Amino acid sequence: LDLTAFVTAMTAFPMQTALVIMLLGAASWLLRGLRTWMLFDQLPLSEALGLSFLHNTANNLAPMRLGELALPMLARWLGGVEFSIGLTSLLWIRLLDFISLIGISLCIILLPVAGTIMLALLAALIFLTPLLLGFIVPKTQHIQLPEILAKARAQLIYEAQNGKRLHRMWRLTILAWLSKIMGMGVLLATLSGIPMTEVVTTILGAELSSILPIHGFAGAGSYEAGGVLGSAFMGLSPVVALEMTIQLHIYVLSLTAVFGILGALLLLKRTIHG
């Protein structure tokens, strides 16, 4: 890894491109905040945004996915939401995230090969996923489960059958991931000179690594390992892949720092006044 070339590339980044990338990243954070507001609609917008920003900050920084617990804990503090309900809400939005990340990434990766077919599949993903969830999730109600899991399933069925709410949350999820992947793709394509359709596997590997419970402190090591593994599917050398993933990680942590501070400021009034 040529550290001199790495630093030079980061400092020589075109200002206009950097602005576009940061705006796309910021849009992703804001869209997730709006989704949280819809999820916990008893909260004021400012508190829902603060909750979302702090939850995602904790999730990016804490090891072993422990930061995920920030969402049900903050929802209980801010809105009196039962911890179990907050936890099930977390599982629901993570399911939407997983479907979005995999679906959008595959469509972009296969776009040069399949062209308009992939665009059609992306459109189908956007419009049909809520309908499929509304059909499949309620089918699980006949499966015998312990009481605590049955309660969580009932909440998931409610979310899946609430069509208007689900469609809105799904659109926010899709837009958030499109913004995030586009920002990351432009960043890596600009720095590496590799087409965006080829760097998406790096993004996919790195982002999927953050889902696993082996997630390190601030993703150190695990994020890079995921990016290198994802890059292997496109035949990129491990050195190039590692350099790209480190650049990607710096971008993610920069946004995390900005929105983590903003989230704390949004909840400062609530903290002072209880």
Image (cartoon, helix red, strand yellow):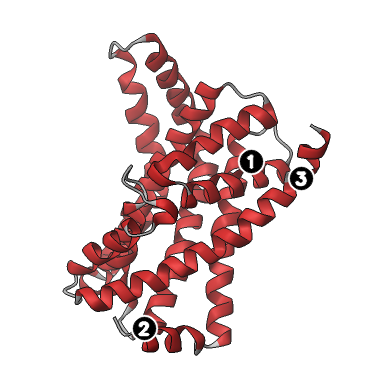
Looking at the rendered structure, the secondary structure element under dot 1 is helix
Coordinates of residue 169 in the picture (x, y in percent): 52, 43
Coordinates of residue 234 in the picture (x, y in percent): 19, 71
Residue ID for mark 2: 3
Judge from the rendering whether residue 270 lies leftward or rightward of residue 233; answer left or right: right
Q: Are marks 1 and 3 in contact (CB under 8 Å)?
A: no
Lower sequence index among marks 1 and 2: 2
Is residue 187 visible in this depiction of the protein? Answer: yes
Type of amino acid under label 3: Leu
Residue ID for mark 3: 268
Q: Residue shown at 41%/42% (left/top)?
A: 65
Residue ID for mark 1: 37
Judge from the rendering whether residue 13 lies leftward or rightward of residue 189; answer left or right: right
Q: Nearer the viewer, residue 39 or 273?
A: 273
Type of amino acid under label 1: Trp
Q: Nearer the viewer, residue 178 or 242?
A: 242
The alpha-carbon separation of the residues under discs 1 and 3 comes to: 18 Å
Type of amino acid under label 2: Leu
Q: Nearer the viewer, residue 163 or 36?
A: 36
Q: How many numbered marks have been drawn onto this rendered protein structure?
A: 3
Lower sequence index among marks 1 and 3: 1
Q: Quadrant of the N terminus?
A: bottom left
Lower sequence index among marks 2 and 3: 2
Looking at the rendered structure, the secondary structure element under dot 2 is helix
The alpha-carbon separation of the residues under discs 1 and 2 comes to: 42 Å
Q: Nearer the viewer, residue 60 or 4?
A: 4
Judge from the rendering whether residue 13 lies leftward or rightward of residue 246; answer left or right: right
Choose top left, top right, bottom left or bottom right for residue 182.
bottom left
Q: Residue shown at 29%/64% (left/top)?
A: 227
